[in-house]
Image (tube, grey):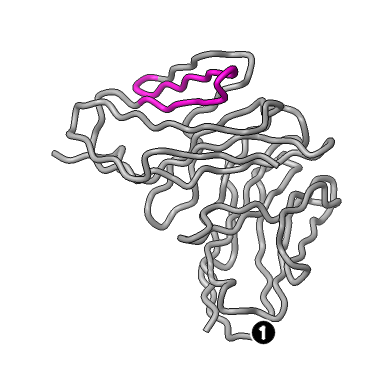
């Protein structure tokens, strides 16, 4: 089955700096890669996703890049703000026959300091 | 449009009891997936339901079961609770199921504590 590794586990940046979180996946058939932000006491919130036929996608201060050959994808947050502080999860949609499921990374706790 | 709702938000049970959690997906969404989130194991896939049928299942014992109703609402049941079942149980809904590019939207979760 699919295996997703995520680094780093914790990341501290100063307000205004950029943050980068990296993930690798194992199943070359995976074709969908979402990123979720989870704040304390809440469920994960979808913030951006990318499909395997696209190399990069940007939404305001957030961007995701995908390298299918190397089987890794990254989340980039520019001009970080205190409200970006949360746990971020990457995920990959892998397949077993015709059934699919999202496999999640272990999460990155991002802290944006003033 | 209302998001995914889960009830109850918090539950405290004792070992050996059983529990039923409920999830109402986003209106129009027909697929519901359940996940268990713990500090040690992270987010683990339990199962997915679409059109009242279980379409996929994760590596959890048979004590974990679920079902989906004709209005797409879903329930999951855990029987003979163990201490290790203490977790945040998350429900996610999506429009479709399977190989399509399926955005999944999560509910706030049910925090289950087993004493």
Q: What residue would you read off at disc 1?
A: B17
- In the rendered image, the vertical position of residue B74 relative to residue B28, given as above or below: below
Q: Is residue A108 left or right of residue B31?
A: left
Q: Is residue B12 left or right of residue A100?
A: left
- In the rendered image, the vertical position of residue B19 relative to residue B87, given as above or below: below
Numbered range of the magenta stretch: A60-76
User: Could you say where residue A96 lies in the image, as x and y percent from the top left?
Assistant: 79, 39
Residue at the left extreme, as displayed: A114
Q: Is residue A86 left or right of residue A42?
A: left
Image quadrant assignment for residue A103: top right
User: Could you say where residue A38 lies in the image, as x and y percent from the top left?
Assistant: 43, 46
Magenta span: predominant SS is strand
Look at 26% across and 30% down and name the residue there.
A80
User: Could you say where residue A53 lies in the image, as x and y percent from the top left?
Assistant: 63, 14
Of the 4 image quadrants, the one containing the N terminus of chain B is top right
- In the rendered image, the vertical position of residue B100 relative to residue B42, given as above or below: above
Give the crowd class for mark 1: few <14, some 14-19, many >=20 residues within 10 Å. Answer: few
User: Could you say where residue A9 lies in the image, as x and y percent from the top left?
Assistant: 37, 45
Look at 53% across and 66% down and name the residue there.
B87
Image quadrant assignment for residue A29: top right
Q: Secondary structure at mark 1?
A: loop
Chain of the residue under label 1: B
């Amino acid at each position: 089955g699919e295996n997703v590794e995520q680094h780093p586990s914790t990341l501290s940046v100063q307000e205004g700096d950029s943050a980068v979180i990296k993930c690798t996946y194992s199943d070359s058939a995976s074709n969908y890669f979402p990123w979720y932000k989870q704040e304390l006491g809440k469920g994960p919130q979808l913030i951006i996703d990318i499909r395997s036929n696209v190399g990069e996608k940007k939404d305001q201060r957030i961007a995701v890049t995908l390298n299918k050959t190397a089987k890794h994808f990254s989340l980039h947050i520019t001009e970080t703000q205190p409200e970006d502080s949360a746990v971020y999860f990457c995920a990959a949609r892998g397949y077993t026959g015709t059934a699919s499921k999202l496999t999640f990374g272990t999460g990155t706790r991002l802290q944006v300091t003033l | 449009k209302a998001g995914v709702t889960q009830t109850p938000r918090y539950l405290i049970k004792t070992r050996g009891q059983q529990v039923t959690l409920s999830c109402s997906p986003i209106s129009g969404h027909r697929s519901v997936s359940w996940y268990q989130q713990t500090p040690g194991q992270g987010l683990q896939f339990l199962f997915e339901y679409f059109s009242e049928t279980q379409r996929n299942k994760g590596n959890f014992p048979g004590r974990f079961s679920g079902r989906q109703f004709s209005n797409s609402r879903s329930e999951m049941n855990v029987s003979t609770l163990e201490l290790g079942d203490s977790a945040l149980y998350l429900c996610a809904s999506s429009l479709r199921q399977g190989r399509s590019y399926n955005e999944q939207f999560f509910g706030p979760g049910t925090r289950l504590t087993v004493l």
